[in-house]
Amino acid sequence: MGVINITPDSFSDGGRFLESERAEREAAHQLRSGADVLDLGAQSTRPGASEVGAEEECHRLLQPLRAIRRQHPSALISVDTFHAAVAEAALNAGADWINDVSGGERDPAMLPLMAEAGCPVVLMHNRGNSQTMDTLTDYDDVVLEVLQGLRRRSEVAIAAGVRSNQIIWDPGLGFAKTHEQNLEILQRLECLTADGVPLLMGPSRKRFIGHVLNEPQPRARIWGTAAVTCRCAHAGVAIVRVHDVKPMAQTLKMAEQLW
């Protein structure tokens, strides 16, 4: 899954693809480089980010989404949002997936929309929001509690009409987790893949990698991201969400031959 942040303030590439033409070029580049899914987001979810609201999200998102759909009619496109209005507008504009960092919890209209759309949906484990999540990292057993949280959100989604075969899990690396907790999740990934629900991991350029490598520049964390990507392949993760598509696609291709 290739990341395209149509935002001015994302943590590693804010502003690079805010203009529609740049987002369109990046989509073409990522597809050529080996992306199977494009994940478009118009609201930064980094720690400390301000929320812009559904109207501004749509203003940023829909023009490049429509253009990418016209140019790449067979591409799989995911929309990264926790607003049902944005998700519905994006689906109508040609998106195929909904990727909700709140696991369908922030907007009560989201789960019914997911059920009606019948499309693949990513439910992510999270606590709080961008302003509060770094203070909500108290776990007795982070892996067990993430797994329980994902199971609970799936049960709520299924009760709302979402089919079990629509659901993809994301344990939310970097969302209400410390550096050490992110590493523990990665060390014990098999606990999360054992239920058989496809698992999506989003390690790309994140702070915990910078912490391990003592690398403050997110775009310089490519080799740390590659190491995590190998671990994901080893554990049978279904999808890895990355910024640097070509090197990570190559990393996954080689890792799949090893495991």
Image (cartoon, rainbow, N blue to C red):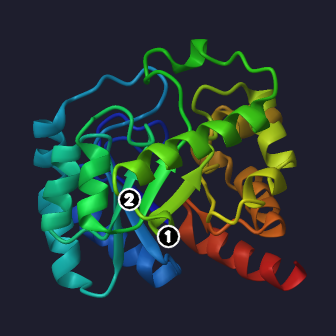
Is residue 54 shown above or below 79? above
Q: Secondary structure at mark 1?
A: helix
Q: Residues within 10 Å of mark 2 (few under 14, many from 20)?
A: many
Of 111 and 45, the residue lying toward us: 111
Quadrant of the drawing holding the C terminus:
bottom right
Is residue 188 shown above or below 130? below
Residue 15 located left or right of residue 12: left
Amino acid carrying label 1: it is Asn
Query: Which residue is found at the position 14% from the left and 47% from the top?
Result: 58
Q: Tell me the tag on residue 162.
A: 2
Query: Which residue is found at the position 42% from the left and 34% from the top?
Result: 45
Of 78 and 143, the residue lying toward us: 143
**Spot occupied by residue 234 in the image (x, y as percentages of width and height):** 84, 67
Q: Tell me the tag on residue 165.
A: 1
Is residue 245 shown above or below 85? below
Q: Residues within 10 Å of mark 1 (few under 14, many from 20)?
A: few
Of 81 and 254, the residue lying toward us: 81
Farthest residue in the front direction? 159
Is residue 153 shown above or below 69? above
Query: Which residue is found at the position 34% from the left and 31% from the top?
Result: 106
